[in-house]
Amino acid sequence: MRVLHLYRPRLPELRAQAVQVLHTCHALAARGHEVTLLADRALGFDGDATEALERYGLNHPPSLDLRLAPTAWPPGAGLWFRAALAGWCARSGRDAVVYARAKRYVAAIPARIPVVLEAHELDSALDREAGRDPGANLALERAVYDRAAGLVTNCAGTLHVIRAGHAVPPHAVVWNATRADRAVPGVGGGGVGVVGSGGDYKGVRSVLLAALDGPAPVTFVGGAEDIPGVRTVAAVGYGEVPSVLAGLDVLLLPLQDNLFGRALTNPLKLWDYLATDRPIVAPDLPSIREVTEDVHFYDPRALSTVAPAIARALAQRVRTPRLRTWEDRAAEIERFLAETLGGSS
């Protein structure tokens, strides 16, 4: 198949969206599909596509057409993207499909090219939760779901939320993943840690403060603010994350009991955590239980339960690793595309 992954990640960046999209494209290309990804250029990065891939520890397979905008200046990058998208569509034949994470660009795809959506959210539902007018997002969603030939969601919760508001095309749930080379044996000694970005919608600060009542020191790798009592470490490169995780005694996953935490997330962090032998402390939410129960749960509505969960995890010491790779994910997407579009894999 000829696949255009429609998202515009900014590369090379450490944001979960960029990591997820790039690895999905790389894994599909490694399976023999001709994959195109049109990406924005990170500010200050002057390298080419191969150098961008190297920042993530990836090679550049011949069937991956990764194109970086020639400029990081947003208006210039936007003009380049629209021209590159139109050019890809004009050259596309019968075996082409657009695999879209970005709904706002779907209207630019000619009707002859099938579009399969990958959804990690429903913006109109998030608008309602936040007390915002959902009208504009609702109109976009209706147009896109009417257009789509298929739908892939990151978790069952996202599919449930979408189906409550829209008629959906043929669909599948395809979780996120990690890389096999990120399964590094643990050495411990570093106490409790969170690795990744913060965010008010995840409740990271509150969970970290609650963790201070536990029996081990607490570290936040990637945090952008000082939290009293918490050791804060600057963000590390993508390839350094496994050794950081291996050096911790317990891996902590913060989420709030909101729409995102309950239903719309399948955290990359969780798959990195599961690939280790380190005990995991995570919130008791459907989004986590959908993937695993091999964690020590805390109640996100009662953060006094965080410290006892950490104590139980420290007593466990090690757990059996569970590895789900991007190749696993690509095989599931490939199978869904073949079944939905009637193509061959």
Image (cartoon, rainbow, N blue to C red):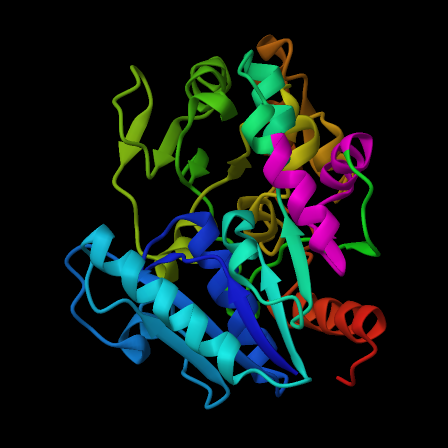
Residue 106 quadrant: bottom right
Point 84% across, 56% down: residue:
170
Placement of the N terminus among the 4 image quadrants: bottom right
* Residue in the image at 37% along x and 33% along y: 220
Res. 229 image quadrant: top left
Residue 260 vertical position relative to residue 271 in the rendered view, above or below: above
Residue located 59% across and 24% down the image: 135
Left or right: 99 in relation to 48: right
Magenta-span inclusion, residue 143:
yes
The residue positioned 43% from the left and 81% from the top of the image is: 65
On the rendered structure, is 336 left or right of 94? Answer: right
Magenta residues span 138-165
The answer to which quarter of the image holds residue 148 is: bottom right
Residue 150 pos. (x, y %): 76, 59
Task: Examine the rendered structure and indicate whether residue 305 appears above or below residue 115.
Answer: above
Foreground: 12 or 117? 117
Q: Nearer the viewer, residue 183 or 38?
A: 38
Picture coordinates of residue 166, whole percent (x, y): 78, 37
Residue 323 at least partly seen: no
Residue 196 is situated, as x and y percent measured from the top left of the image, at: 41, 41
Vertical side of 88 occupied by 206: above or below: above
Q: Is residue 104 visible?
A: yes
Residue 53 relative to residue 288: left or right: left
